Image: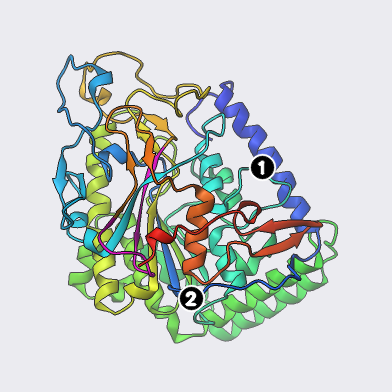
Amino acid sequence: MSALDLDQPESLARRDFLKRLSAASLATLSGSAPRASAEAITHPTATADACIVIWMAGGMAAPDTWDPKRYLPFKVGTKVADILSTFPAIDTCVDQIKICQGLENMAKVMDRGTLIRTHTLPDLGSILHSRHQYHWHTGYVPPQTVAAPHIGAWMSKVIGPRNPVIPAFINIGQRLEGVGESEEVKAFTTGGFFGNEHGPMNLPYPEEAALAVRPPKGMEPARFENRNRFFRKLLDQTPSRDKMGDYQQESMLRSLENAHRLLNSKDRSAFDITLEPRESYDAYNTSRFGQGCLLARRLVESGARFVEVTTEYVPFLNFDTHANGHTTMERMHKEIDAPIARLILDLETRGLLDRTLVIVASEFSRDMIMEGKPGSTAGDQAGYQGDTIKEMTHYGQHRHFTASSSVLMFGGGMKRGHLHGATAEERPFLVTKDPVTIPDLHATIMTAMGISPKTMFEVEKRPFYVTEDGKGQAVRDLFA
């Protein structure tokens, strides 16, 4: 659980959310296999073969990263309402694009990608990070009657692996055990109704990723193979049809076979970031997140289809800046700036950027004084409620802002050096032109990967689309 008191409305909403998600997951596990639509679907020509999502978990403040506004430095007595950005704007290598101080390496690679400043997000009532993260990653507002697949699972199911040995969906940097809201995060970090074989390979610690593709210590390959074979036989014979349907059991068995194949492949060396040349390793090694970016590059080089790297969502840490926002953002700038820029340059140097779609995104933005968006009934969750700045911990973007957010897209057929849309220069930072919704962003991503936004599977006798109700429209202005 998070540090919120269990009697608070946020925690009550969270418990209800989990209860309903669990019911959906059980319904999916006991149901029949998802069936592809019988209608002929024309898939677009892919402009990307691989996708990397760089997930800025916790709510990355656009005014302190990619969409700088009027800057006021820290000063005791300054009115909170007068502060729009807590970092000054800096020039980038693209004339019309400015970003925030502390992102100097990213400023040098902006000519390789597109900056969307108008990612619009819905007001989901109570602002739970888990609800917004579930929505972004699956395209559906939770809870659903079935377990919605992560966008990485859709790619695994519809277009499959690039390299049959490397898992098609890999998740780097997020611990799913022992941290606040771990159950909620696990709810969308799955293959959903597609089953285990299309779920993620979770690698919370990049430096230990190599251990995940080796037999347990002290267990020789022959013994491990016998143990694996026995486990598959036991699973196949276990009378658990009341909890897990035939399709889900078969999917689990196939996932075990895939794992066994990887353990016996030389391609598993891609998981060992200690094999990276020292200069390259040091360039990425700003944090566990930076190591994750290096691992993502190595995996895409070896044939991974979809990789997500996260700064990790843990309540009140990293981009979840409920207090001491400016100081925390200074640290986060240092953690993300060099690794993301180096990832873009390394992919370009290796001839991979043109066919690798890199997306930098977060569940929402932040603001000094506004919770949600204009008209929202969401309760204020910021720790400091005063009108003036009295100490450094008060200086920063502490509240959830859901009306607009920024997204970066590199490679994969996207325009280079392009700025899409604009937000108001004064609070509230509403979109003033060219909004991009979650369904349309997902349609853009899927179109780049060669998947029609209208792709549909029938689950529990209802249609389920890759974009909500199949209505997502690719934003053609983003494509080169």
Question: According to the image, label 2 marks what residue?
Answer: 214
Q: Closer to the camera, 2 or 455?
A: 455
Q: In which quadrant of the rendered image does the C terminus lie?
A: bottom left
Circle 1 SS class: loop
Question: Is 125 situated above or below 422?
Answer: above
Task: Report whether 236 appears left or right of 478.
Answer: right
- On screen, 206 above or below 22? below
Q: Residue at x 44, y 37 (%)?
A: 315
Q: Quadrant of residue 51?
A: bottom left
Nearest to the observer: residue 52 or residue 47? 47
Image point 43% across, 73% down: which residue? Answer: 47
Residue 143, disc: 1
Q: Is residue 152 visible?
A: yes
**Image coordinates for residue 197, horizontal then vertical, percent:** 63, 70
* Mark 1 neighbour class, 10 Å CA radius: few under 14, some 14 to 19, many 20 or more: many
Residue 321, how many percent across, how many down? 35, 34
Tell me how the rendering is colored.
rainbow
Q: CA distance from mark 1 to mark 2?
A: 37 Å
Q: Is residue 423 magenta?
A: no
Q: Is residue 54 above or below residue 78?
A: below
> Residue 83, which numbered label?
none
Residue 404 at x, y percent in the picture: 40, 39
Q: Nearer the viewer, residue 467 or 153?
A: 467
Q: Which is more foreground, mark 1 or mark 2? A: 1
